[in-house]
Image (tube, rainbow, N blue to C red):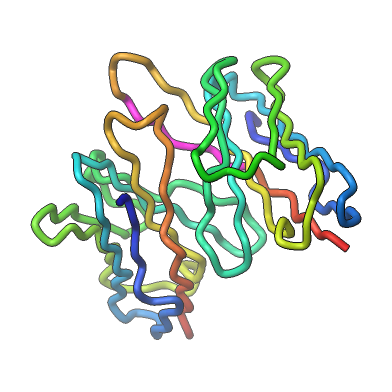
Amino acid sequence: DAMVIQNPRYQVTQFGKPVTLSCSQTLNHNVMYWYQQKSSQAPKLLFHYYDKDFNNEADTPDNFQSRRPNTSFCFLDIRSPGLGDAAMYLCATSTWTSGRGTYNEQFFGPGTRLTVL
Amino acid sequence: AQRVTQPEKLLSVFKGAPVELKCNYSYSGSPELFWYVQYSRQRLQLLLRHISRESIKGFTADLNKGETSFHLKKPFAQEEDSAMYYCALSGLGGSQGNLIFGKGTKLSVKP
């Protein structure tokens, strides 16, 4: 089945130790998103890629970076995790057709729960 | 400012009772509204979107621009409807369909 895969499902890191979360998709979608969801809060968009074009949300901390080496993979790098970065990180994909203004369904991965010790 | 408000954190109903999950939004342009659902131990998935005007799993939602609302309704709740429901907004002119989510309402349907 075509899907969005996130690895690992659970990640434990130490305060200040860089960590990378990965997302892959078999849907061949041109847009990939990273959301942060803290307990009892709404998923919050961090950034997204439209093809190779990176789009950062204005309030995303510099501590968060992303890479998309190809259509299928997208990575979330947290350079120096703090205790406040403990959260569920959701990856999502969708298609977007420039000029048509068509918003298509976002397909979500299962998420990676990050714990910072 | 763009915002989605779901006033109820938890909604508990009995099986067969009507259910309405409230969603209000704030957006200056013409938004597109969605309901996403997350069943226990499953991923977040689209339930319905206002432009489709369809009923999914017995749920419907009507966009009321005057009241800036997009409430989700079902006349007879089933136990399998128990889940976390998120209302989300995407704005035309925004970049590539970014979603703004509400905080979610947990629906519990009791037997």
Indicate whether A70 appears above or below A15. Answer: above
Q: Is residue B12 left or right of residue A57?
A: left
User: Where is residue B71 shown, x and y percent of the image?
Assistant: 26, 63
Which quadrant of the rendered structure holds the N terminus of chain A? Answer: top right
Q: Is residue A17 left or right of residue B25?
A: right
At horizontal 51% and vertical 38% (from top left) the residue drawn is A57
Tell me, yes or no, whether the highlighted magenta stretch contains residue A113: no
User: Where is residue A110 shown, x and y percent of the image?
Assistant: 67, 48
At horizontal 35% and vertical 30% (from top left) the residue drawn is A103
Which region is colored magenta?
A102-108
User: Where is residue B82 shown, x and y percent of the image?
Assistant: 49, 71
The answer to which quarter of the image holds residue B59 is bottom left
Question: Which residue is at the front of the view, A2 or A9?
Answer: A9
Q: Is residue B45 left or right of residue A83?
A: left
Tell me, yes or no, whether the highlighted magenta stretch contains residue A104: yes
At horizontal 29% and vertical 72% (from top left) the residue drawn is B20
Indicate whether A5 appears above or below A54. Answer: below
